[in-house]
Image: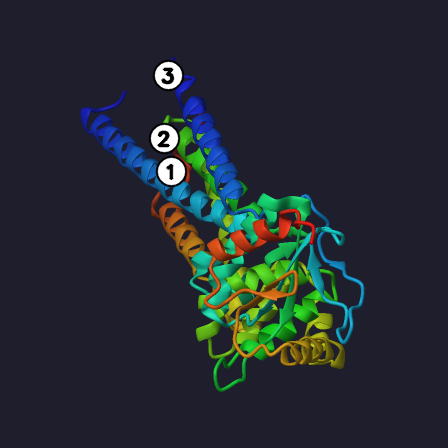
Amino acid sequence: MKRYLPLSIVAAAGLLALGAGTMLYQAKRPIVLSIPRNSIAPETAGAEPVHVRGEVNAPVTLEEFGDFQCPPCGKLAGPTKQLEEAYGSQLRVIFRQFPLPVKVHAHAQEAALASEAAGLQGCFWEMHDLLYREQDGWSKAADARALFRGYAGMLGLDLDRFEKDMDGSEARERVASDQKRGDALGVHSTPTVFINDRQIPAPVAVAGLRSAINAALKPQPPR
Amino acid sequence: MKTEANSQTEGAGSRARTVLTTVAAFISLAGLADAIYLSVVAMTGEAAACGGSAGCFEVLGSPYARIAGVPVAFLGVWGYFAAFAFAIFAGFGYKRALGLFALTVGAMFAMTLWLLYVQAFVLHAFCRYCLFSAAFTFLLAGLVVAGLPPRASEGEE
């Protein structure tokens, strides 16, 4: 009996470690949506191609003007993702860059550029989710760019290209294009959310979004 | 013929060995937990528990955090598990396990020195979970030096 005791202890520890690792992985792994991600919406009037998650022909479109350093935007990110899961193919989400001025949010512009640089390597939404999830950390950091580089590394991006793209004109133009659209629509704070082109009154709450989506999904009575 | 004094010395040595291997097993388990956490971070990109420190992301996101695409933390998982297993077997009197334990810890110690060098002189950033792991490895190395490796006078079981 004693002969098998060390083997039993080692096997038990191995199984425990495997179980704990699996549970930790399950708890922390990013939610994988079954709907297509990062598809590009057709160009609309006055707007460059944008970041879209969901079915292109979904009956409801949620368009968010966000600033990665804005705490309410960060708080909205998780529930928005839950809405995407709940409504599935009926909802598509568009993210528009609207970084507030450096005086208000010191790293917002850089964060927007980091997300666009990641987007140029096909990982916009992954960086979007990471930036919101880690908002508390990089917002207070003296050198946020070093963190963004670290995030890019975590996502497996080409770091040299990421750095170049962050400083490049393409990322800057994408951000500027979204801001231009926001200005044209009268956006002046974040998050500003539109459901099927109708603005949700601030402060934006999940309950309000849900009821607006439900209303948009109801068949319109004949006039 | 063994004297009574010799028997008492052997008994005391055996008890000390049991205590040391038990301590080594617990340290290995702590290191294993740390390495599992770092592996999950490497697989998911989740790093909130790093406290958002720039150092953590710089280290875990650097090319040095992977070898041929495999996260270094995976090696840590195997290393600590092997150290735990050898410590347990050594505690039950398998003297060959002591040599394997010392060999494993030696390899982990060398790897730790390399990773510390990279953090200090290449990346100029430190990841606290990597430092925890380094501390566990140093403790294990300390135990090896303190007397866990088999003595030349001891026979194999």
Same chain, marks 2 and 1? yes
Along the viewing direction, whichever of A157 and A175 lies nearer the viewer: A175
Q: Nearer the viewer, residue A111 or A207?
A: A207
Pointer 3 chain: A
Q: Residues within 10 Å of mark 3 (few under 14, many from 20)?
A: few
Most extreme residue toward the bottom is A103
Query: Callout 1: few (<14), some (14-19), or many (20+) C-alpha neighbours within 10 Å?
Result: many
Q: Which mark is residue A2?
A: 3
Badge 1 sits on which subunit? B
The residue that disc 2 covers is: B91
CA distance separating discs 3 and 2: 12 Å
Q: Tag 3, which secondary structure?
A: loop
**Left or right: where does residue A198 sit relative to residue A51?**
left
Place of residue B95 in the rendered image (x, y in percent of width and height, measured from the top left): 43, 30
Q: Position of residue A29 (x, y in %)?
A: 56, 46
User: CA gap, disc 2 to disc 1?
Assistant: 9 Å
User: Of the numbered discs in the image, which one, if any, rests on residue B7?
Assistant: none
User: Which quarter shows the C terminus of chain B?
Assistant: top left
